[in-house]
Image (cartoon, helix red, strand yellow):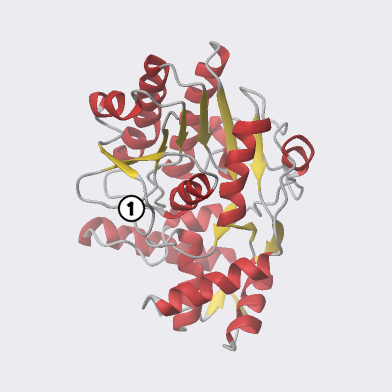
Amino acid sequence: MKPVLVTGATGFLGWHVAKHLVESGERVRALVRPSSSVRELDVEVASGDLRDAGSLERAAAGCGAVYHVAADYRLWAKDSGDLYRSNVDGTRNMLEAARKAGVERFVYTSTVGCIGIPAGGIGNEETPVSLADMTGHYKRSKFLAEQVALEYAGSGFPVYIVNPTAPVGDHDVKPTPTGKIIVDFLKGNMPAYVDTGLNLVDASDTARGHLLAAERGKPGERYILGGQNLTLRQILDQLAALSGKAAPKVRIPYPVAYLAGVCSTAAAQVTGKEPRAPLEGVRMARKKMWVSCDKAQRDLGFRAAPVEQALEKAIRWFGQNGYC
């Protein structure tokens, strides 16, 4: 049996993808930087880095498939070039290494941030979108990386693209920006909220969608892997009901949130510490990231469990692991 290479298995979504592959009987090889490790999973470790093309060629050698889940997912970085070097250059390096290795399937993890969202409406894989629509360096870097994946697919390489929405659940070790919302809520560090919206989905379901894309998808196609469209107020109300803690009642007007983002991000550039309210995140919040998952449901047989279950898992895991 040829091994399956997973990048990002030391992170949140990549860990869940690796877990599903292990449970399905695959021999999993995880690309791991020397300073990291894969928790709780029986996988083969390949030391490497997305910026080191040689290490990727060694990791991909002999593999039948690659799940490229790794990304630099930050809404603020002192050097924004880091995001492009990891997300764009790293994706090209991984694709080229996989092509040289002759892998049979390459699943690329993009993001819902690369999906076009019509004003006041619901986006899907066919909604027109361009680089100009991308807010901030994270989204721009991921959009450019997705274009690299499409370029390889156009040349005949079997690339399947998935666009997860906002995964939540257990093992969000960093945590992700969405996970941080949950942690801040549980710690009582969210006295108010902004009028925005997200599509939440269980990370485990999203991981399963990756395997479905490899099994049933079409090369060069994009598939949104999501769950339920909710306002931030609805998310906080669900967290309150599940945790017994009070949800914030005060809604911050967008201009006030924007000013807070400007000040917080400016201070971070001086101190080097992550801002409490990254301006990029505030700017993203102006648009509700609501999408349709009809294509993945129809073509892949993808289904997501009720989001309450994912939030409950997140609350329990964060509590058991000392985050709040």
Assign the N terminus to one quadrant of the image.
top left
Q: Locate residue 58 relative to residue 24 in the image: left or right.
A: left
- Residue 123 occupies which quadrant of the picture? top right
Where in the figure is residue 234, as x and y percent of width and height?
69, 71
Question: Is any part of residue 274 visible from this angle?
Answer: yes
Where in the figure is residue 293, as x and y percent of width and height?
73, 45
Local SS, label 1? loop
- Residue 248 occupies which quadrant of the picture? bottom right
- Outermost residue, top direction? 155
Where in the figure is residue 75, as x and y percent of width and height?
41, 52
Q: Is residue 239 above or below residue 154?
A: below
Q: Locate residue 271 relative to residue 324 in the image: left or right.
A: left
Which residue is more in the foreground, 116 or 169? 169
Q: Locate residue 182 relative to residue 229 in the image: left or right.
A: left
At a point 65% along the width and 51% down the height, the residue shown is 289
Residue underneath mark 1:
38
Question: Is any part of residue 252 visible from this angle?
Answer: no
Where in the figure is residue 305, as x and y percent of width and height?
70, 60
Q: Amino acid at mark 1?
A: Val
At a point 58% along the width and 84% down the height, the residue shown is 243
Total number of numbered discs in the rendering: 1
Q: Is residue 42 above or below residue 7?
A: below
- Residue 32 occupies which quadrant of the picture? top left
At a point 71% along the width and 64% down the height, the residue shown is 306
Which residue is more in the foreground, 193 or 177? 177
Which residue is more in the foreground, 97 or 5? 5
- Outermost residue, front direction? 1
Which residue is more in the foreground, 133 or 293? 293
